[in-house]
Image (tube, rainbow, N blue to C red):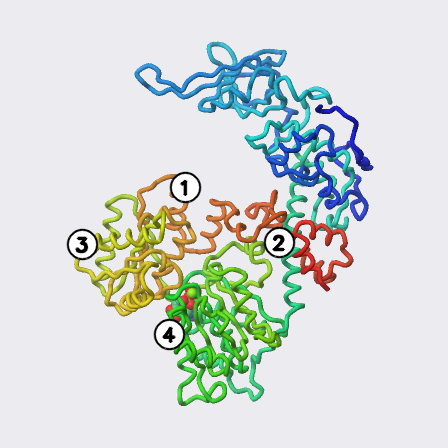
Amino acid sequence: MVGGGAAKPVEPGPHAGTSSAGGSQGGAGGRKLRQLSELDVSVLSGVGPAVQAELAQLGIGSVLDLLTHYPRRYVDGTRLVHIAEVVPGDSVSVLAEVTRVKSAGPGYGRGRRRSPSRVVAEVADGTGTMSVVFFNQPWRSKQLVAGTLTLLFGEAGTYGGSLQMIGPTAEVLRLAGSDPNPTGGPPVGRVYPVYPLSERTRLTSARIGRFVEEALDRAGTFADPLATARRDLLGLVDRTTAFNGIHRPAHLDEVPPARRRLAFDELFRLQLSLVLRQHRLQADSHGLRHVVARADGTPTLLERFLDGLPFRATAAQMRAIEEIRSDLAGPLPMHRLLQGDVGAGKTVVALAALLVAVEGGHQGAFMAPTEVLAEQHAASIVSLVSCLGAPDQAPPVAGRPPRVELLTAKTPTRERARIHAGLLDGTVDLLVGTHALLTDQVSFRSLGAVVIDEQHRFGVEQRAALRAKGRGGDGLGHDPDLLVMTATPIPRTAAMVVFGDLDRTVIDQLPPGRQPVTTRWARTPLDAEEAWARVRSEVADGHRAFVVCPLVEGSPRVEATSVVAEAERLAGSELRGISVGLLHGQMPAAEKERVMDGFRQGRYAVLVATTVVEVGVDVPEATVMVIEDADRFGIAQLHQLRGRVGRGSSPSWCYLLSAVDTPESAARLGAVERSGDGFELAEVDLALRGEGTILGARQKGRSDLRLARLLVDRDLVVEARETAEEIVSSDPGLAEHGLLAEELALFVGAEEAEYLFKS
Ligand code: ADP
Ligand code: MG
């Protein structure tokens, strides 16, 4: 049935047949992506129910799906060589038919040496024959049955006087005995796209290519949501050229501009939805204009706070505070992400924001992901604002110093009731806590600003839930200003994609006097002994040390057991005679607090812990961090853990214990050993792991980036962002950009679109 049957009724486009489409005008005329999304692949000749099912396996249902199923690479058929012309030693592409295939092994050869399995295919192209050998790919014997037309690429050699290729890349162009190619001979002399396939289908790349060709022919000219002038400005080809260039380039040179255009479209749609969302939030908002200066010229609470700090805020902290202050002074609620490496001093900046709210008679909330962190923040905030209540100073607000309360899951009921009452009558100015802040009973008299620490530990809904407390039960209140913080730096362009609906401030400087942390990857037992010796000598000098135990697969219970065992082992060996505290997630809260306290005050010189110490724990006396089985941790986590030391003014060390020396772990541990810069490490992390992890949280459904790559397309991300901002600022409802709006709706889904375009 392939190629048979009458053409199904789809009107041919004006552009049918050509591949470079240089003359396309774009604009409103032409084929729209929405139309293609509504056409089932079964409209294409050769796509009956069976093929349709196979395409579905590849996630292809509509013609649009087919056209966005991009080639994974290309074989340059213009460089094909006949077998008779192959010179041993050259890397060549050969198109040939399999004449015979046999397989052997695996088995044991002489001397009981294990020999790998082997598949040998004889191929011929009319000018000569060659044998092709694959080791350890037994499935090749089923793939390359006699009669299969295959495109081989690899280095030619000789064996016993005849030509041979070992382990070439082999693409099946035509299956044996089926799948005839009615449109003529093999695609010699042109560029051949290689499509991603699934092992579960019998579809070949060539066959998908033919469906794509038909789809492109019948689609003709594509409508282009980008005006010619804008395309020229951005150096982008039109969409018709792009789709044709990526699927059937006449020459390999056509691929990069085509890819660039299509990748731009992906990033542009994403940025457009983020910018619209940002715009929407502002349009819907009911913000507060905070008071950032006093009419009588006397110093504000913020100014007195900065004056009273036991240190001078760094220039970077001051810049951040200024940006936040101007957000707060404006009518729209702030949505800002504060990034700063571990130890950069984000807490002071966050507190500054909260104090501006307090100055105007509003309240501030500070939410942290763990009890340990919340307690620590509460304690440091109390001490940082204590200067504001000094008797020789004018009272800040309503004649009293700011009152700070801590609310966590373990706050006793009576205490909790007291705090709830204080929040309602406005006598509590600053509330610090965990998820407990989100419970229904927590209502504020007037919530003016919200800070969320380590925002990646919270979901978007939790962020929204805390903000919503500003509106109050009757919904008549206002939207508080929001600052979210993270010490997990991500590269700028990645941030544009992941946090594209937030403004962004970076604290790019550490407080002065910080000693860099000397980091060593301890590979051998001797190296490890050096680490333990360092712990002992630092403890002898009155400093403290962390030992982080390996992540244990399985339940938190299993992990806890293993930490307990390791603490006991250390106390009886490497750390004999030293007071060792133990901290893990399974301990009762009171016990955790007791241990943290003991460590802060020096009753324990060493804290053996799971990664519960990962974020934010601030003990300036700690100078050594030992991370066991360091290869089990990611770069970001290692950097976070290392950030627990080097917080005071004494030199500090971090030891990464790991004997695992695979290229992968060497890349990670080596990077952490070499660099102390969180942003640099974030780049390395991105390069090593790819962007999937970063994007994981954000991406869903159609908006998946198929071609765009954060690492290589940085300029495109920025250009897409700028273009989106420009368009939204002049046309926030996209009323004059109908095609764009339609396309966006297609990719973000109807519900989101309705929200974004609501006027
Ligand atoms: P992070 O950005 O990791 O949250 P913190 O806010 O916990 O950092 O600050 C780390 C430590 O540095 C704290 O002990 C804090 O008091 C101190 N600190 C903050 N800013 C400065 C500064 N400008 N000069 C000196 N020490 C500072
Ligand atoms: Mg912090």
Q: Which mark is residue 718?
A: 2
Closer to the chain start, of discs 3 and 1, is: 3
Q: Is mark 1 within 8 Å of ligand 1?
A: no
Dot in front, 3 or 4:
4
Residue type beneath disc 2: Val
Q: Which mark is residue 412?
A: 4
Closer to the chain start, of discs 2 and 4, is: 4
Say which residue label 1 marks.
Answer: 664
Name which residue lies at 35% across and 15% down: 109
Residue type beneath disc 1: Glu
Q: Cα distance, mark 2 to mark 3? A: 56 Å
Indicate the secondary structure of the residue bearing disc 3. helix
Q: Position of residue 166 (x, y in %)?
A: 49, 20
Closer to the chain start, of discs 1 and 2, is: 1
Say which residue label 3 marks.
Answer: 572
Closer to the chain start, of discs 3 and 4, is: 4
Quarter of the figure with the N terminus: top right
Q: Cα distance, mark 3 to mark 4? A: 38 Å
**103 displayed left or right of 698:** left
Dot in front, 3 or 1:
3
Q: Say above or below: 401 vs 665.
A: below
Closer to the chain start, of discs 2 and 3, is: 3
Indicate the secondary structure of the residue bearing disc 1. helix
Quarter of the figure with the C terminus: bottom right
**Relative depth, front residue between 548 and 654:** 548
